[in-house]
Image (cartoon, helix red, strand yellow):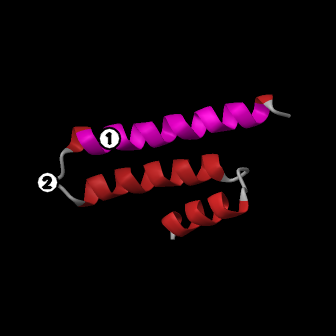
Amino acid sequence: MLTEAFALADERGERAWEPELYRLRGELILQGKSEQGGSPIVTLSSEAEACFQRAIEIARQQRQGR
C-alpha cells in the first residue's frame, strides 16, 4: 500500500504527505528487521535511517517554501 501511496502522490503531484510516507517506510523497514532475525541489521538500519533523513529533508524544504 505504501508503494501505491508513493505512486499516487507522484502521479498527482501531491507532496504534502511525502515526509510521512518516508517516515512510515522507515518504520516498516525497522519492523521487518525485528521480525526477520537473520537479516543484515546494519543494511536495514541504514535503509531506515535514509528514509527518516529523507522525510526530515523534505519537511524542511516544505517549511521553507511557505
Quadrant assignment, res 61: top right
Q: Is residue 29 above or below residue 12?
A: above
Whether the magenta-drawn stretch holds residue 44 is answered as yes
Left or right for 32, reference 52: left
**Amino acid beneath label 1:** Ser
Boundaries of the magenta span: 43-63
Left or right for 26, reference 16: left
- For the point 13% across and 54% down, the residue is 38
Query: Is 30 or 46 nearer to us in this picture?
Result: 46
What is the x, y in percent for residue 32? Answer: 31, 58
- For the point 86% across and 34% down, the residue is 66
- For the point 63% across and 58% down, the residue is 10
Whether the magenta-drawn stretch holds residue 50 is answered as yes
Query: Is 35 or 64 nearer to us in this picture?
Result: 64
Label 1: which secondary element: helix
How far apart are the two marked residues, 1 and 2, measured between alpha carbons?
13 Å
What is the x, y in percent for residue 20? Answer: 61, 51
Q: Residues within 10 Å of mark 1 (few under 14, many from 20)?
A: some
Q: Would you say the magenta stretch is mainly helix, strand or loop?
A: helix
**Amino acid beneath label 2:** Gly
From this viewpoint, which residue is outermost toward the top?
A: 64
Residue that numbered label 2 is attached to: 38
Q: Are marks 1 and 2 in contact (CB under 8 Å)?
A: no
Residue that numbered label 1 is attached to: 45
From this viewpoint, which residue is outermost toward the right?
A: 66
Q: Residues within 10 Å of mark 2 (few under 14, many from 20)?
A: few
What is the x, y in percent for residue 15? Answer: 70, 50
